Image: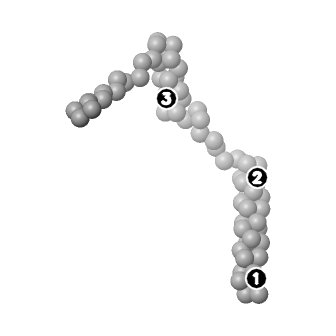
Amino acid sequence: MGNVKITENPPYFDDEEKEMIEEFERSLDGGMLVSHLTPARRAELEVSARHAIDLMERGNNRTWQRKVA
């Protein structure tokens, strides 16, 4: 097994698969999958972020209190 050379061929796609991949790539280029920030979505994200920060701060406070005690 000394001089074994392994070569990989590119993946084979039939016409239908290739078309699906190309269509997906075009949708990425066209901005179809871009999520625009609306005021409602912004409010949801802010609430979620505040909740996550509160959880982290509570966890840090508990850890700090255990170390001090």
Position of 3 with respect to 42 (left or right) is left
Name the kind of residue labelled 3 in the image. Answer: Glu
Circle 2 residues within 10 Å: few <14, some 14–19, many ≥20: few
Is the residue 54 above or below the residue 20 in the image?
A: below
Task: Give the image quarter of residue 62.
Answer: bottom right
Query: Please, what is the three-letter code of the amino acid marked with disc 2?
Result: Glu
> Which circle marks residue 14 in the picture?
none
Mark 2, residue position: 44
**Badge 1 local density, few (<14 within 10 Å), some, or many (20+)?**
few
Cα distance in 3D space between marks 1 and 2? 32 Å
Q: Label 3 belongs to which residue? A: 25
Q: Is residue 39 left or right of residue 30?
A: right
Q: Which numbered disc flags the more N-terminal residue, 1 or 2?
A: 2
Above-or-below relation of 20 to 39: above
Label 1, secondary structure: give it.
Answer: helix
Residue 34, horizontal then vertical, whole percent: 59, 39
Residue 35 position in % (x across, y down): 63, 41
**Number of numbered labels in the structure image:** 3
**Image point 72% across, 54% down: which residue?**
45
Where the N terminus falls, by quadrant?
Answer: top left
Q: In this rendering, which labeled residue sits more in front, label 1 or label 2?
A: 1
Is residue 61 visible to us here? no
* Label 2 to label 3: alpha-carbon separation: 29 Å
Please state the horizontal and vertical placement of residue 51, each as a whole percent of the image. 77, 62
Disc 3 to disc 1, C-alpha distance? 52 Å
Label 2, secondary structure: give it. helix
- In front of the other: 6 or 9: 6
Q: Which residue is mark 1?
A: 65
